[in-house]
């Protein structure tokens, strides 16, 4: 009959069920108002007629997400969404292009033909991916937050290393702290094990890991699956910010 809202360990309000709505409750939960809880800014830049990616006859052999002959154009600077139920192939597209599952066809990125079935080639070409399976694919759960954030960048671009090819701990910690603040990753320390975080905060670490690669093209598969509404809004706002400020194609 009554609903009590707590946020960050503090009582926000208690009110009768009859005096509220799901939208108002969501606003109280995340502290950002009750009208149109998730708001997306309108683009402040023109979408280019130039193509960021072309996909021709893409076929992906991913269990449960098989694709058979996908043709698609993605323009530079746009956010393109592909919807569908589980098993209808939408997740197969990024997994195939990124080389996680066997794929065939022709894919070009900013005019250059991609080498399929090679994750390292895809990453070196300027792409990154936030996987739909953050625990199985996206993260090293037994490692620290800061190691997770920089791991791919260290492997692919040799970033965050000293001149002696050792981990630059100071630089890694500073960058991880920056990502912690920008993405509001709730943790006691960036040295904390990633497996101890909530689902929403693990997803933010996945986003930070992709951003450390400084990609030109970013795949995000099911970016808000299994996370609370506050984390959902922050993830979506981050994607929009990347598109608006960095002109990143997503």
Image (spheres, grey):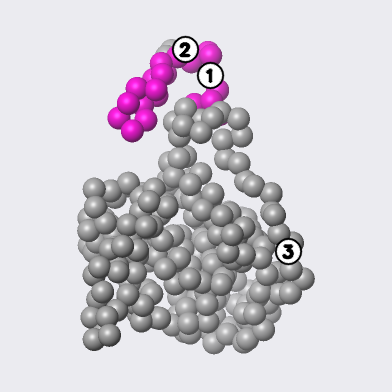
Residue identified by numbered label 2: 16
| Quadrant for the C terminus in the image | bottom right
Q: Toward which corner of the image does residue 176 lie, by quadrant?
A: bottom left
Residue 170 position in % (x across, y down): 25, 68
Cα separation between marks 3 and 1 = 40 Å
Q: Nearer the viewer, mark 3 or mark 1?
A: 3
Report if the CB atoms under discs 3 and 1 are less than 8 Å apart.
Answer: no
Mark 1 Cα-neighbour bin, 10 Å: few <14, some 14–19, many ≥20: few
Q: Secondary structure at mark 3?
A: loop
The dot on residue 20 is 1
Residue occupying the point 62% across, 64% down: 247
Residue occupying the point 42% across, 68% down: 212
Residue occupying the point 48% across, 47% down: 234
Tell which circle, 2 or 3, labels the residue nearer the N-terminal end. 2
Cα separation between marks 2 and 1 = 7 Å
Stretch of the chain drawn in magenta: 3-26
Cα separation between marks 2 and 3 = 46 Å
Height in image: 124 above or below 83?
Answer: below
Q: Nearer the viewer, residue 160 or 63?
A: 160
Residue 140 visible in the shown view: no
Q: Toward which corner of the image does residue 163 lie, by quadrant?
A: bottom left
Q: Nearer the viewer, mark 2 or mark 3?
A: 3
Residue identified by numbered label 3: 47
Report if the CB atoms under discs 2 and 1 are less than 8 Å apart.
Answer: yes
């Amino acid at each position: 009959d009554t609903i009590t809202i707590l946020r960050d360990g503090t009582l926000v309000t208690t009110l009768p069920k009859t005096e509220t709505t799901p939208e108002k409750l969501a606003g109280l939960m995340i502290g950002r108002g009750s009208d149109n809880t998730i708001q997306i800014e309108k683009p402040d830049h023109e979408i280019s007629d130039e193509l960021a990616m072309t996909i021709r006859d893409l076929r992906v052999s991913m269990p449960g997400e098989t694709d058979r002959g996908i043709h698609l154009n993605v323009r530079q600077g746009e956010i393109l969404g592909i919807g569908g139920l589980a098993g209808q192939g939408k997740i197969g597209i990024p997994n195939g292009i990124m080389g996680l599952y066997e794929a065939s066809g022709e894919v070009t990125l900013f005019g250059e033909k991609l080498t399929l079935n090679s994750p390292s080639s895809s990453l070196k070409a300027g792409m990154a991916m936030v996987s739909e399976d953050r625990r199985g694919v996206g993260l090293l759960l037994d490692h620290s937050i800061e190691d997770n954030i920089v791991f791919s960048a260290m492997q692919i671009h040799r970033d965050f290393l000293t001149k002696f090819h050792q981990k630059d701990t100071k630089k890694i910690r500073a960058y991880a702290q920056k990502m912690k603040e920008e993405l509001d990753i709730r943790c006691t320390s960036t040295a904390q094990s990633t497996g101890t975080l909530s689902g929403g905060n693990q997803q933010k670490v996945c986003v930070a890991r992709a951003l450390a690669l400084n990609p030109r093209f970013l795949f995000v598969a099911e970016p808000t699956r299994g996370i609370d509404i506050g984390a959902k809004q922050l993830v979506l706002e981050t994607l929009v910010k990347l598109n608006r400020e960095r002109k990143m194609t997503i």
